[in-house]
Image (tube, helix red, strand yellow):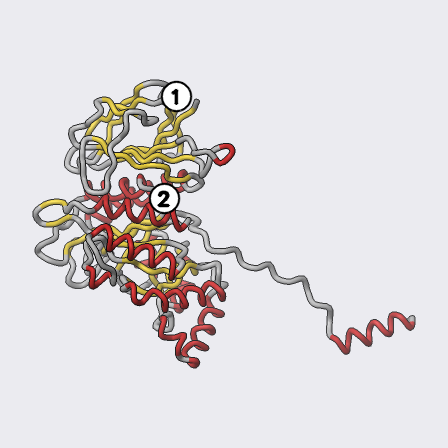
């Protein structure tokens, strides 16, 4: 043994082996597969997980003990635990337990997000911001999930003042600035016993605008049941309307209230687990949502226009829009969501390359005539294929509340 080699061995014994290359830091959370989830479901089991996976849900609510189970079914988990609370950070012992929980679950392949709270008041935002920052510091790869009120919440619930738009916009702005969320989630239920309440698109437009300002995706929780005589159970056609209008506004996630819950009628499954008509409709629609939102994921929502209907928060389709409808004011109303690159050459405004076109009558089918500036292709989400439909005018035959993704080839 040479003297140099002996010295090297001695130094190695004294100092320890040279450190291995530093582990690569986990990448920040990204949506990945567009989110399909639910609010209020049964306790997790193999039978429940199998049913959810078969129905096209891909994010389920779970506890730590459920992570292995949902992984077996190819599902992602939103972890709920009493420790995931803003109050935990003020208690050293509880904070230590929270950190231990994060350390145990953060490498589990089924973990997707941490559930924090539903519908907080703006006064809670500073404390929630501290918790979100704490979770992000220890586990940047998984989202901290908070769900917000709808536009019809009162000023007292929101913790802000003013008319509907003023108070709600301030609520959203404070949430973004103080909490710094990775995703914006909210709920809005508009199917009343006497008709459709008018703020659905207003809520969508305000959330879309705020999410774009924050540079984060958003998720829409929609109605799938009744819980009071003043609300009605949506039909499968109305669920189609909710799915397609949500993706047309650029959402990367959709959730349904409820999957199954005592005191609620309708929902996804009955109390005994029997699928309802809504389950069977969503079994197709969930996959449509994921595939259409997946096609749009690399793009940016550039504009949303309405024709044949005027509701709060909507903008009329301008005469110089890249797509025109023929007739221009369809009887049941139509929605066009335009998508394109985040920015054009030299940072100029991007030109639309895709559109989601929705016929807004959720009681009967409709044929929408569409005129484009170039060759139009139509996306078939079931086959995951694009079909060329030629230049000029095309007709889209859409079921009640149905939508279609098209792209322009110049």
Q: Closer to the camera, 286 or 210?
A: 210
Q: Closer to the camera, 73 or 119?
A: 119
Q: Closer to the camera, 79 or 325?
A: 325
Q: Closer to the camera, 160 or 310?
A: 160
Image side of residue 193 versus residue 33, left or right: left
The residue under label 2 is 290
The location of residue 227, given as percent across then percent down, is 14, 58
Residue 277 seen in the current view: yes
Mark number, residue 24:
none
Query: Which badge, 1 or 2, is on the more N-terminal residue?
Result: 2
Q: Is residue 394 above or below residue 402?
A: above
Q: Residues within 10 Å of mark 2 (few under 14, many from 20)?
A: many
Q: Residues within 10 Å of mark 1 (few under 14, many from 20)?
A: some
Mark pair 1, 2: CA separation: 27 Å
Which residue of the protein is positioned furthest toward the front in this rendering? 162
Which residue of the protein is positioned furthest toward the bottom in this rendering? 93
The quadrant of the picture occupied by the N terminus is bottom right
Residue depicted at 44% across the width and 39% down the height? 342
The location of residue 165, given as percent across then percent down, is 23, 50
Image side of residue 291 versus residue 15, left or right: left
Q: Where, by quadrant of the figure, is residue 94 drawn?
A: bottom left
Residue 275 seen in the current view: no
The location of residue 4, given as percent across then percent down, is 89, 70
The location of residue 256, given as percent across then percent down, is 26, 52
> Mark 1 or mark 2, which is nearer to you?
1
- Badge count: 2
The residue under label 1 is 374
Label 1: element kind: loop
Q: Is residue 374 above or below residue 259?
A: above
Residue depicted at 43% across the width and 73% down the height? 98
Residue depicted at 22% across the width and 63% down the height? 157
């Amino acid at each position: 043994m040479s003297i140099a080699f002996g010295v090297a061995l001695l130094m190695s014994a004294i100092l320890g082996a040279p450190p291995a290359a530093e582990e690569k830091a986990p990448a920040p959370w990204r949506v990945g597969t567009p989110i399909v989830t639910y609010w209020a479901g049964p306790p997790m089991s193999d039978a429940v997980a199998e049913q959810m996976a078969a129905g096209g849900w891909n994010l389920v609510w779970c506890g730590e003990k459920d992570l292995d189970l949902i992984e077996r079914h190819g599902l992602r988990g939103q972890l709920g635990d009493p420790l995931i609370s803003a109050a935990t950070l003020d208690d050293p012992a509880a904070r230590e337990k929270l950190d231990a929980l994060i350390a145990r679950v953060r490498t589990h392949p089924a973990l997707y997000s941490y559930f924090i709270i539903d519908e907080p008041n703006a006064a809670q935002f500073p404390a929630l911001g501290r918790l979100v920052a704490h979770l992000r510091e220890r586990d940047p790869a998984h989202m901290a999930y908070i769900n917000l009120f709808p536009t019809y919440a009162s000023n007292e619930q929101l913790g802000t003042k003013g008319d509907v738009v003023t108070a709600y916009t301030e609520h959203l702005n404070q949430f973004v600035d103080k909490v710094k969320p990775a995703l914006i989630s909210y709920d809005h239920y508009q199917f009343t016993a006497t008709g459709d309440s008018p703020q659905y698109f207003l809520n969508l437009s305000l959330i879309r605008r705020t999410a774009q300002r924050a540079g984060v995706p958003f998720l829409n929780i929609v109605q799938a049941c009744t819980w009071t005589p003043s609300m009605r159970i949506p039909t499968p056609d109305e669920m189609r309307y909710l799915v397609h209008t949500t993706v047309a506004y650029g959402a990367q996630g959709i959730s349904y209230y409820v999957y199954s819950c005592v005191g609620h009628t309708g929902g996804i499954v009955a109390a005994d687990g029997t699928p309802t008509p809504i389950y069977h409709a969503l079994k197709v629609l969930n996959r449509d949502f994921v595939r259409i939102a997946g096609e749009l994921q690399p793009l940016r929502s550039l504009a949303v226009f309405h024709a044949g209907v005027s509701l709060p928060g909507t903008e009329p389709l301008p005469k110089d829009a890249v797509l025109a409808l023929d007739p221009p004011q369809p009887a049941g109303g139509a929605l066009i969501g335009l998508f394109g690159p985040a920015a054009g050459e030299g940072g100029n405004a991007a030109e639309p390359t895709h559109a989601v076109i929705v016929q807004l009558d959720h009681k009967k089918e409709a044929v929408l005539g569409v005129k484009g500036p170039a060759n139009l292709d139509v996306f078939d989400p079931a086959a995951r294929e694009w079909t060329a439909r030629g230049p000029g005018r095309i007709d889209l035959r859409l079921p009640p509340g149905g939508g279609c993704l098209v792209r322009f080839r110049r």
